Image (cartoon, rainbow, N blue to C red):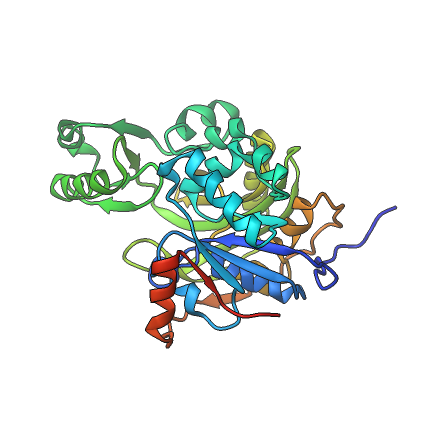
Amino acid sequence: MHRSPQNPDLSALDITIAVTGLKTGDNPQPGVPVIRSIRAAGFKGRIIGLVYDSMESGIYLDDLVDEVYQMPYPSAGAEAFLTRMEYIVAKSKIDVIIPTLDAEVILYIRLQDELRKLGIHSYLPTEECFLLRDKTKLATYFPPRGILVPDTALVSEISQIISSKEQYPMMIKGRYYEAYKANNVEEGLKYFYEIESRWGLPIILQKMIPGDEYNIVIVGDGEGGILGMVPQKKLVITDKGKGFGGVVVKNQQLEEFATKVIALLKWRGPCELEVMRGYDRQYYLIEINPRFPAWVRLAEGSGQNQPAAVVLKALGQDLAPLPQCKSGTLFIRHAEDIITDISLMGEISAKSELMKKEK
């Protein structure tokens, strides 16, 4: 029987949800908006924040999370990760987890079976699918399949930056994070060293595509279909290229382009496509981020609550189609100061956990 599109209602769920990535600020992580979208779906259960740093500002927001636990960095490996998760689950049962940071997603994918034994469910792509969307592979996998990608090169030596002098301006990117527009060799060398010091090699050089930039948040069903899709056009961009304002757009060609990308990958779970519409009126795939973006509340605000949908899919529940998003819905990011007592920071720094409140 056909069911009309509707947003998930989480008000009847008596579970605990864990979400990572609680940093806000000029380069915000997606955890806080993901949690707020889940609460907007009527969820009254417990929410646990998993953080890597006691300075993640979402820790100190009132009424956001019930408990906070500090996690070992993904580079510490699977054993350290599972040991910490076993400790947390012994104190607070976790039913669903939504990882929101690029570098940690592969660990959650590889350890899904172990997490399931702990009672923790997620809604993530396969490892093969995840690796196909790596920035280093986009230019080899997609163009033969009819998806345009800007010319891309992997470099590991500064001589390659210098020898590319005829190609500036270009984008210089880290494999996981950070992207800068370099206008000349001097800027190219500067960004090469900055990215190398933080994220290592290789560095990615990508041809600039002048035109209009779009971002699309999607939840794929793992079979090539799409459960929800919200495209936005950036209106306010920071010097780091982060969108601090955008508007939902209705664009059939853009949606067809995104649908083809997801169909090729058979992506399961949330992701963000970064797309340029060049002055040649062609669409180019720039990046695929394997998690919700920090602007995901725009999806909820436009009538499509994707984080709530991911919670239900992680639990294995059937899901009615999500409603169409409302074009013209605008978001503007607003920074504000959080006032709290330093004892809270001292507690999480000393104990690596923080009990925020009892329900």
Q: Is residue 236 visible?
A: no
Residue 148, given in percent of the width and then of the height, sits at 45, 32
Q: Residue at x 50, y 47 (%)?
A: 87
Q: Quadrant of the C terminus?
A: bottom right
32 sits to left or right of 159? right
Rendered view: 166 above or below 70:
above
Q: Quadrant of residue 285?
A: top left
From the viewer's side, name the closer residue of 315 and 294: 315
324 sits to left or right of 78? right
Q: Residue at x 47, y 28 (%)?
A: 132
Residue that lies at the very extreme toward the right in this rendered image: 1
Residue 82, given in percent of the width and then of the height, sits at 49, 39
From the viewer's side, name the closer residue of 250 and 154: 154
188 sits to left or right of 251? left
Q: Residue at x 46, y 50 (%)?
A: 214
Q: Quadrant of residue 346?
A: bottom left
From the viewer's side, name the closer residue of 206 and 46: 46
Rendered view: 134 above or below 312:
above
Residue 133, given in percent of the width and then of the height, sits at 46, 33
Q: Residue at x 41, y 27 (%)?
A: 137
Q: How many marks do you count on the picture?
A: 0
Residue 90, given in percent of the width and then of the height, sits at 56, 49
Q: Is residue 88 visible?
A: yes
